[in-house]
Amino acid sequence: MGDLPFLFLFLVLAFVFGFVAIPPYIRILYRYRLGKNIRTEALVGQASEYARLHQAKAGTPTMGGGVILLVILVLVALSIIAQAFSPVVEELFGVTIRFSLWNRNETYIALFTLFVLGAVGAVDDYMNVRGIGRTKGLSARLKFALLILFGMAGGWWFFEKLGYSSVALPVLGSLDIGIFYIPLFIFVILAMANSVNFTDGLDGLAGGLLLFGYGVYAFIAYDKWLLILSAVCMLVVGTLVAFLWYNIKPAQFIMGDVGSLSLGATLGVIAMMTDTLVVLAIISGIFALELFSVVIQITSKKLRGGKKVFRIAPYHHHLEALGWREETVVMRLWLVGLILSVVGLVVYLLTR
């Protein structure tokens, strides 16, 4: 069987497994009362307007991103088993299985990122639903420190072990930055993990934008002959489609940090692996807008005696506070995200 049918198979399997697994997963979240607490404190000051707008969502099950990681874990494990029994499968069904999804050269780092930061996010989500900590979750400083440590380890591995030290730039070609590749890697991890985390505030918003991003990188990885990495991206896409079926308004569950931190950082890692940082910057435009709105808001509050630039940050909540309906905000930001994804893909095709 050719490569494209196999990739399509992973996409379909991920959707089917996700669609079947999500309803019982939601029931488990309800059973153990893993419902979201609406924050009343911002990073600087109070979040009273946010609490007013979203009080109706209090108690909605969170940690929904956990089912995405669970489906991917199961399918990766099944691919390993299928490869181990490849001769039997070929004899019975006439299908040759040439690889599993657990591959040293292509998927170890991406999957490691996905599950390690998923674990960090899961701890944060659990602390939130149980009301543990002053901010009902891991403190911003602690999460920031953990992401920096992870980024340092990943950047060192890419630089020292894998020999990465340059960045591809349109027109200019490859720019060698030497040891500065490590702080660049740290920045990408911090930016992607936090920006997706900030974007995960409206029903379906982060999931839809991630769907576009991983779809683009499924193509890029395939084009660069990273077929197994492309298959992992297909798993994420398929599972996100199933996830969004239950996550669009009114959401039956929320992605939570377990999904947003891990999927955001993993997308950044895949961009570094494929040397397409400029493409990532383009397709992540909405994520960047959300992140910058938070940075601007915090800076303004600290330097201007509590004065704000936005009614609420991140930016999607600002639009809500201006009177936009939640569905309108999500659909319009999806449209912009889709356009940016197409632009990013075109830039990749023109400069590869």
Image (cartoon, helix red, strand yellow):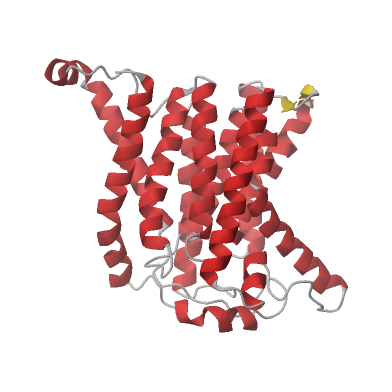
Q: Is residue 241 left or right of residue 163?
A: left
Kindly tell me whether residue 76 is visible in this rendering.
Answer: no
Kindly tell me whether residue 142 is visible in this rendering.
Answer: yes
Q: Is residue 229 above or below residue 24?
A: above
Q: How many marks?
A: 0
Location of the N terminus by quadrant is top left
Residue 46 % position (x, y): 67, 81
User: In the displayed image of the protein, which residue is found farthest to the left?
Assistant: 92
Residue 12 % position (x, y): 31, 39
Q: Is residue 281 above or below residue 54?
A: above
Residue 85: quarter of image: top left
At 73% from the left and 27% from the top, the residue drawn is: 167
Residue 310 % position (x, y): 74, 72
At 47% from the left and 29% from the top, the residue drawn is: 229
Q: Is residue 167 left or right of residue 75?
A: right
Of 162 and 142, the residue lying toward us: 162
At 76% from the left and 68% from the top, the residue drawn is: 297
Location of the C terminus by quadrant is top right
